[in-house]
Image: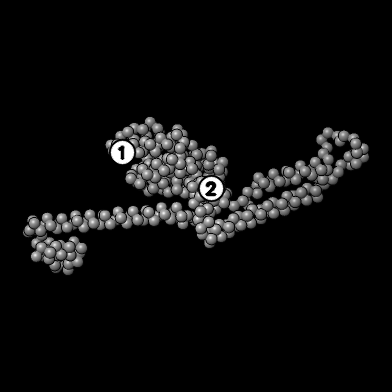
C-alpha cells in the first residue's frame, strides 16, 4: 500500500498523471495532512537528486573543458596568428607547441598560416621596392640626379662648394627620403594584423585612474564583505594585482570567481589582470559580463578597457571603433574625451 502510494506521488511530481487524475489527487492532498507532508518530502528528495546530478554534470563539463584547454584543442586561427606574431603568453605557447608536436594536421595548419604571413610580408616588401624605384625614377627624370655643370668644370680633387652634393650622396638622400615617405604612409599597410600599441600604451592607465574603483572606496567595499573567507580571498587577489604579480593575480581571481562568479570586483580586476598579461580576449569576456549585469558601477570602466583590449587584438579595429563610438554617444562616460581622441587617430 505504501509502495503504491509512493508511486502515485512520484507520478504526480513528474507530471505523469492525466488532468482529471491530477485534480483528484490534489484534492486528496488538501484533505490529508500526512499525504501533504509525504508529497513535500518526495519533492525535496527529487530536487536533491536533481541538484546532485547537475553538480556532477557541471563538474564533468568543467573537467572536460580544462582537459581540452590543456591539450590545446580550444586554439583557433586567431590564437595561431597571435602565436606567430608573439602575442601569446608563455603558458599558451607551451600548450600550442605541445599540440603541434602531437597533432600533425594542426602543425600543418600553423605552417600554412606562417607561410601565408610570410607571403603577405614578401608581397609588401616587393611593392615597397617598386614604389621606391618609381619615386627615384621620377626624381631622376626631373634632373635631380644630374651632375652640376660647375662640378664638371672643377678639378676632381677640388672640394665642392658648400650646399652642392655629389651624385652619390644626392641619390642616397633621395632614396632615403623616398623610403621614409613611403614607409610613413604605406608600408605598414602590407603588414598582417596591425594592432595599435602606441595608442594603447598612451591610454591604458590603471594606477590611480579608475573612476569606478578608487582604492579607498574599494577597501571600504571589501572590508564590508561579511563572509570572512570571501573577503580574505578577494584581498589576496587584489594584493597580488597591486604588487604587479599579474599572472598570480589571474590564478587567484580564477579560484575566487569559481566560488563567487557574480562578484563585480572580482570580474573587473580579473579582466584588468588578463590585460596586464596580454590575454585580451579573456579580458573582454570579463568586461562583457559586467556590461551585461545589472550593477552600473563598473560599466563605464568595463567598456573603456574593452575598447582598449580590442586595440591589441589583430584584426579587431572595427570592434574597437564600435566601442569607442558607444562611449562618445553615451554622453555620460568619464572617458568621452579619450574616446574621441582615439577615434580621430583611427578613423
Q: Nearer the viewer, residue 281 or 50?
A: 50
- Residue farthest front in this picture: 102
> Residue 35 at what x, y percent from top left?
10, 58
Residue at (45, 39) in percent of width and height? 246
Alpha-carbon neighbours of circle 1 within 10 Å: few (<14), some, or many (≥20)? Answer: few
Q: Is 265 positioned to the left or the right of 174 in the image?
A: left
Indicate left or right for 238 with 18 as reference: right
Secondary-structure class at tag 2: loop
Report if residue 93 is visible in the image. yes
Q: Nearer the viewer, residue 98 or 209?
A: 98
The numbered disc on residue 87 is 2
Quadrant including the N terminus: bottom left
Camera sees residue 300: no
Residue nearest the observer in this picture, 335 or 77: 77
Extreme residue toward the top, this view: 216
| Residue furthest out toward the left | 31
Q: Which mark is residue 229?
A: 1
Q: Position of residue 298 (x, y in %)?
A: 39, 41
From what the image shows, is residue 30 above or below residue 179?
below
Amino acid at each position: 500500500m505504501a509502495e503504491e502510494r509512493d508511486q502515485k506521488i512520484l507520478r504526480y511530481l513528474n507530471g505523469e498523471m492525466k488532468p482529471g487524475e491530477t485534480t483528484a489527487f490534489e484534492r486528496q492532498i488538501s484533505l490529508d495532512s500526512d499525504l501533504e507532508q509525504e508529497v513535500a518530502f518526495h519533492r525535496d528528495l527529487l530536487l536533491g537528486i536533481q541538484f546532485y546530478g547537475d553538480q556532477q554534470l557541471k563538474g564533468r563539463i568543467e573537467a572536460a573543458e580544462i582537459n581540452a584547454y590543456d591539450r590545446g584543442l580550444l586554439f583557433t586561427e586567431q590564437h595561431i596568428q597571435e602565436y606567430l606574431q608573439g602575442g601569446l603568453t608563455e603558458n599558451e605557447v607551451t600548450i600550442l607547441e605541445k599540440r603541434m608536436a602531437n597533432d600533425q594536421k594542426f602543425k600543418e595548419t600553423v605552417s600554412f598560416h606562417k607561410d601565408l604571413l610570410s607571403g603577405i610580408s614578401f608581397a609588401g616588401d616587393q611593392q615597397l621596392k617598386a614604389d621606391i624605384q618609381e619615386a627615384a625614377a621620377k626624381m631622376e627624370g626631373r634632373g635631380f640626379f644630374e651632375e652640376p655643370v660647375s662640378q664638371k668644370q672643377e678639378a676632381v680633387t677640388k672640394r665642392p662648394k658648400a650646399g652642392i652634393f655629389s651624385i652619390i650622396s644626392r641619390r642616397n638622400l633621395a632614396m632615403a627620403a623616398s623610403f621614409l615617405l613611403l614607409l610613413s604612409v604605406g608600408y605598414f599597410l602590407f603588414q598582417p594584423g596591425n594592432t595599435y600599441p602606441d595608442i594603447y600604451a598612451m591610454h591604458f592607465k590603471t594606477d590611480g585612474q579608475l573612476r569606478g574603483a578608487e582604492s579607498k572606496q574599494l577597501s571600504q567595499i571589501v572590508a564590508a564583505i561579511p563572509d570572512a573567507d570571501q573577503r580574505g580571498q578577494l584581498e589576496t587577489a587584489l594584493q597580488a594585482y597591486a604588487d604587479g604579480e599579474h599572472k598570480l593575480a589571474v590564478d587567484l581571481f580564477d579560484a575566487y570567481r569559481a566560488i563567487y562568479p557574480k562578484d563585480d570586483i572580482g570580474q573587473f580586476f580579473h579582466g584588468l589582470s588578463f590585460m596586464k598579461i596580454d590575454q585580451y580576449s579573456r579580458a573582454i569576456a570579463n568586461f562583457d559580463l559586467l556590461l551585461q549585469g545589472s550593477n552600473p558601477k563598473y560599466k563605464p570602466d568595463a567598456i573603456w578597457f574593452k575598447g582598449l583590449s580590442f586595440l591589441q587584438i589583430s584584426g579587431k579595429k572595427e570592434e574597437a571603433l564600435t566601442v569607442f563610438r558607444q562611449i562618445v554617444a553615451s554622453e555620460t562616460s568619464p572617458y568621452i574625451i579619450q574616446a574621441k581622441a582615439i577615434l580621430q587617430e583611427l578613423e
